[in-house]
Amino acid sequence: MAVTIEEVHGVAELARLRFSPAEEERLAGELNRILRYMDKLNELDTTGVEPTSHVLPLANAFRRDEATPFPATAEIAAAAPQRQEDYFKVPRIID
C-alpha cells in the first residue's frame, strides 16, 4: 500500500494545511518509507510473545485516591466577594 501525492494533498486539505508540490512529494516519500518499515516489522514472528503496554515492568506509581478535608475552607470562603451558603456566587454567563 503506497501513499500517493493525491492522498497527501487530500489529508493536507482536511487538516487545512498547504504544501507546495515539492513538499507533497517529499511527504509522500517519507510516509511510504514509514509504511515500508512497518511492513518489515510485520514480517517478524511474534507467536508466543505476550502483548505489552510498556517496555518496562512498571507498577502503578500513583498515590491512592483518598478524599481529605481541606483545612482552610472557611478562610477561602470568607475571601469570596459573594457567597450563598457554602458556595461561591458568580455572575451568570449562559443566556
Image (cartoon, grey):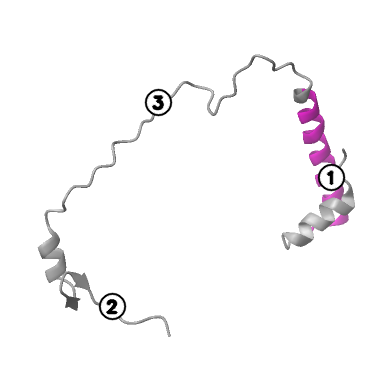
Q: Nearer the viewer, residue 15 or 87?
A: 87
Q: Which residue is mark 1?
A: 28
Residue position marked by numbered label 2 in the rendering? 90
User: Could you classify mark 1 by the number of other residues whose Cα lies within 10 Å: few (under 14), some (14-19), or many (20 or more)?
Assistant: many
Q: Which residues are magenta?
A: 18-40
Membership of 32 in magenta stretch:
yes
Q: Which residue type does callout 2 highlight?
A: Val
Amino acid type assigned to the residue bearing label 1 in the image: Ala
The answer to whether residue 18 shows anywhere in this view is no
**Position of 25 relative to 77 (above/below):** above
- Structural distance between the alpha carbons of marks 1 and 2: 53 Å
Q: Which residue is mark 3?
A: 59
Query: Image point 10% across, 64% down: which residue?
Result: 74
Circle 3 Cα neighbour tier, 10 Å, few/some/many (<14 / 14–19 / ≥20): few
Residue 55, image quadrant: top right
The residue depicted at 80 percent of the width and 35 percent of the height is 35
Percent across and percent down for residue 23 are: 82, 51
- Give residue 13's position: percent from left, percent from top: 78, 61
Q: Earlier in the sequence, mark 1 or mark 2?
A: 1
Q: Circles 3 and 1: CB distance less than 8 Å?
A: no
Residue extending furthest toward the bottom: 95
